[in-house]
Amino acid sequence: MKPELSIVVPAYNEGEHLAGVIAEMTDVFGKAGIDYEIVIVNNGSSDDTGTIVDQLAHENQRIRAVHLHQNRKYSGGIRAGLAEARGAVMGWAHADGQADPYDVVRLYRAMLEQKCELAKAIRRERHESPWRIVQGKIWYGIFQLLFWSPYRDVNATPKLMTRRAADILKLDSRDWFLDPEFVIKALRNKIAICEVETIWRSRRSGSTRAHLLTGLEFLKNLILYRVGIR
């Protein structure tokens, strides 16, 4: 029996808090009465993430484990999970606890109510460093200059899509560009995205993997998509 909703959770060295993040997800999804599965991708971790993922999958049949021996970056980890997802609707959320699982429920219900095939969050409030917030505004400004879009906060997660929409978008990013690709291909294919405002919480522990090179990759990909090479 295929679930209604598949959520992919990419995890790279998230062992310190992963069990707590997943416990919150299962609690919220269960109380919402959603037939769900969580696909956790151990994205080439060097800590005990892999062991924790296997333990979680052993304890809960709604949790599935995917192990990548080498890190495939943000986009590669999510795509590996999406390839294993069985739900009629599928998407992704981070393993660091910044996204409230109830926002996944809100997005899913918005899709059903508005009959949307794509959905994404908008971070109305962000509990991050001032520099991270400024960076986000800069990159969004560049995105809007190159691809005028009615959608806000293109990098925000969670993101959801029907299986039909996934087949149309054919997401193929291999670095950090999966979230903007989602929006760009929705625009290209004229598929509406429903949005829900959320509060972006602080990371449970650790720090973000994004850095200067991530920004340069972002700019390179924006240009490639703008000129039609991608």
Image (cartoon, helix red, strand yellow):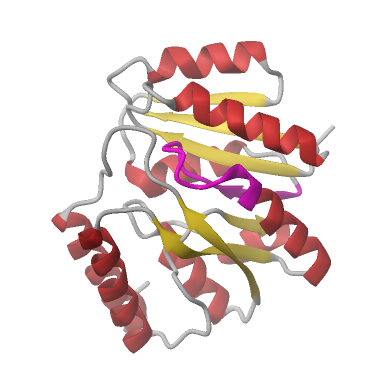
Question: 140 or 196, which lies in front?
Answer: 196
Which image quadrant: the N terminus? top right
Image coordinates for residue 211, horizontal then vertical, percent:
18, 52
Q: Nearer the viewer, residue 188 or 180?
A: 180
Q: Nearer the viewer, residue 217 or 120?
A: 120
Q: Is residue 212 left or right of residue 3?
A: left
Q: Which part of the image, by quadrant, shows the C terminus?
A: bottom left
Q: Which residue lies at the image location 73% right of the left edge and 69% below the top edge?
A: 116
Q: Position of residue 95 (x, y in %)?
A: 45, 36
- Residue 172 in which image quadrant: bottom left
Determine the residue positioned at 22% across, 56% down.
Answer: 214
Q: Position of residue 203 (x, y in %)?
A: 37, 40
Q: What segment carries the magenta color?
A: 88-103
The residue at 74%/63% (across/down) is 111
Residue 61 shows in the view: yes
Q: Is residue 44 magenta?
A: no
- Name the residue at 41% across, 38% down: 96
Q: Is residue 131 above or below residue 103?
A: below
Relative to 150, say whether 4 is above or below.
above
The number of numbered discs placed on residues in the rendered structure image is 0
Quarter assignment of residue 45: top left
Q: Is residue 147 above or below residue 221?
A: below
User: Quick check: is 91 in the magenta stretch?
Assistant: yes
**Camera-side residue of 81 and 138:** 138
Reply above or below: 109 against 229.
above
> Is residue 66 something one can see in this rendering?
no
Farthest-out residue, left:
212
- Residue 25, image x, y percentages: 62, 34
Q: Quadrant of residue 6?
A: top right
